[in-house]
Amino acid sequence: MLVVFLAYLAFFSLALPPSMLGVAWPSIQLSFGVPLSAAGLISPVGTATGLVATSLAARFTRRFGVGRVLAAGTLLSAVGLTANALSATWWQFLATIAVLGFAGGAIDAGLNAYAARWFGPGRITMLHACYGVGAALSPLIATATIATGAGWRPAYLIVAGILAVTGVVFTLTRQHWRATTVASSPTRAQRPAVRVWTVDSVAGMAAVVVQNGIEMTVALWAFTFLTQHVGVDTVVAGTLASGYWFLLVIGRIGFGQLAERVGAWRVLSIATVLLVVAAVLVNTPSPVAALVAVVGFGLACAPIYPLLILTTAERTSPEAADQVVGFQAGASALGSATIPGLVGLAIQQNSGAFGPALAVLVVAAGLVYLFLRYRLSHR
């Protein structure tokens, strides 16, 4: 149980650094005297270094063990956040984002691979639910420091302190992870050569790209769509937009327990059907339908990514699973970074493009899911 608790703590802490940027950015922008649009550089820099880390994560964990990778990644994140807070120029700040991206990518891929191998549906969905809790907490920290006049830098230092403490905890408990993984895994000499880049692994990565693209598109643009296109009251739309993250948390916990009873693939089927229903509702000219659609997207998206991680070995092979999970973690970051931006370009021309764009993404997600099931049934 100690390792399970540590995994939950790790995913909670993983969500803290990136989630407060939205609240802190207006203040950061003023501090460095850069245009508001400069925020568009942050995600590509963090994603690029994160992709490097996720591609190397399996190698890191084999050599050093999950515990050491987790401890080092968390402590490196604390250093990166401290450097964020102390940055004197915009370019220094951007360089520290590269550090955070690398550290977060290593933790994300290494821990997901570990969870895919050792956790069941309930625990892996709870793991990702803990990410949602962290994503909801750090914006509140940034809001509090900015509202009191202290600015954005103390918020980054507070979160850096939290990560430093958790990093020490992971360092002191690293032997628990190493004993669990190393003793149960084959040695390097025993491991056969495996094919990582296969039709099944690429299809899984495509599913993750589209899925996380949908999840982040709704998170980023639902408020704009509801207020500017549908005419929903600002308070109602804002409350629902904030509650979207809690819907993801609730959905992951609930669907995770359901998956323990009926299996991961049945829950994935249910979630895919819910995505289709939400896509229909969001294109219905009714404020009530639009509000229900956002709720539907939150619940539907909740279990899909963690269960795709969980079923990686089943879809590919146990030997290749750790590496494929790492690439899927990179695909997650790629989808989250690119698809909402592309949808945003369409919304800039017409706020009503939100609905059709999500419909296209849901069709793509459904087709990839059907392909995965087809491939699985013909293995």
Image (spheres, rainbow, N blue to C red):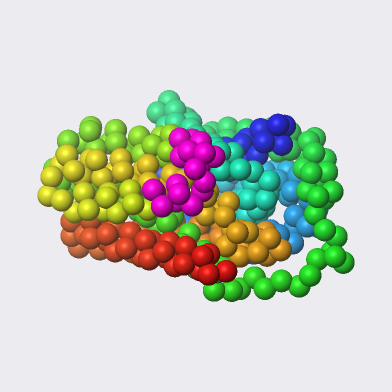
Can residue 28 be seen by looking at this rendering? no
Q: Which quarter of the figure has residue 99?
A: bottom right
**Residue 20's x, y, as percent?**
47, 40
Extent of the magenta region = 252-271
Whether the magenta-drawn stretch holds residue 270 is answered as yes
Foreground residue, 243 or 312?
312
Q: Main secondary structure of the magenta part?
A: helix
Residue found 51% across the figure and 48% down from its top? 264
Left or right: where 92 falls relative to 186 = left
Left or right: where 150 falls relative to 50 = left
**Residue 322's x, y, as percent?**
67, 59
Q: How many labels, in total? A: 0
Left or right: where 350 falls relative to 74 = left
The quadrant the C terminus occupies is bottom right
Can residue 317 be seen by looking at this rendering? yes
The quadrant the N terminus occupies is top right
**Residue 370's x, y, as percent?**
41, 64
Residue found 72% across the figure and 32% down from its top? 2
